[in-house]
Image: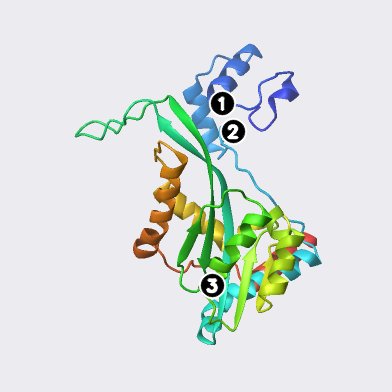
Amino acid sequence: MACSEPAGLGLHMTHWSTRSLARVASHRGIASISHATVALILRDADLQPHRVRYWKTPVPDDTFRHKAAQVLWCYENAQALAERGEVVLCLDEKPKIQVLEPNCLTRPMKPGLLEKKEFEYTRHGTVNFLAKLVVHSGQMRGWCPERNDSANLCALLPQLLGDHREARRIHLIWDNGPSHVARQTRDFLRSHYPHVRVLFTPAHASWLNQAELLLRAFGARYLVRGDWASRLELIDHLESSWPEYNLLYAHPFTWSWTRAKMHEWVDRHRS
């Protein structure tokens, strides 16, 4: 039963739990069984119907192989490129961060008592956050554009790339977001920054962008459990937080998925 979908038994529930398995088993004429016994049976069989894991698999075609190889080459050679005057950058956005303010003050932690937060809150809009990662150093820089579109991105590119005006070449890695692939962005980079080599991650493979790891690490330390009374307060917080992240946490990410492993993965899936 645990390995079949409930719909196969004429039920409308979407998944199993130990209690639902025990209850349905008793309704189907099996001797009465407790959910604790069901849990033991599932544990012995190494089955976990109460858990699920999502995945997003890119199409392992030649386009994926080519684009992924370009990105992975940059990661493998980031330090060597930096030593000869080139820099590898990753860029990603965290759009529409909700500005939430609890309706009552948070009660701080005390001996024997957890911190308590009010369940009800007031919304004060959203804030966009754009983050740049310098791959060879792990240093970041952040901005809060008014909108997550091509016009705002082009307005920030001079600041984003200006930190590296001495670089002989810039390898810029980002995903296929609308503001990245827009003609306005492409034309702006081609006209003003011909030494920038733009690399797009393959479709459905934005996880190849190390800036996603950066935003996850940054958000866990500077956004989770945060309260803000206005958009301006959150913007001030974000603009003050990324320098602190650089001081306390910044380091190059350990990236283990090499081009060789990628080619093995593609060959295995295509076969």
Q: Give how far across and how far down residue 113 sits, in percent.
A: 24, 31
In the rendered structure, the answer to whether residue 223 lies left or right of residue 130 reads: left
What residue sits 47% from the left and 38% below the top?
99
Q: Which mark is residue 17?
A: 1
Badge 3 element: helix
In the rendered structure, the answer to whether residue 184 lies left or right of residue 173 reads: right
The CA span between labels 1 and 2 is 6 Å
Residue identifier under label 2: 49
Is residue 97 or residue 16 the one in the foreground? 97
The answer to whether 232 is drawn above or below residue 114 in the figure is below
Is residue 28 or residue 93 the one in the foreground? 93
Circles 1 and 2: CB atoms closer than 8 Å: yes
What residue sits 53% from the left and 76% below the top?
164
Q: What residue type is labelled 2?
A: Pro
Residue identifier under label 3: 162
Label 3 packing within 10 angstroms: few (<14), some (14-19), many (20+): few
The CA span between labels 1 and 3 is 55 Å
Any part of residue 188 in sight:
yes
Is residue 33 or residue 192 the one in the foreground? 192
What residue sits 34% from the left and 62% below the top?
248
N-terminal label among 3 and 2: 2
The answer to whether 123 is drawn above or below residue 73 in the figure is above
Any part of residue 177 in sight:
no
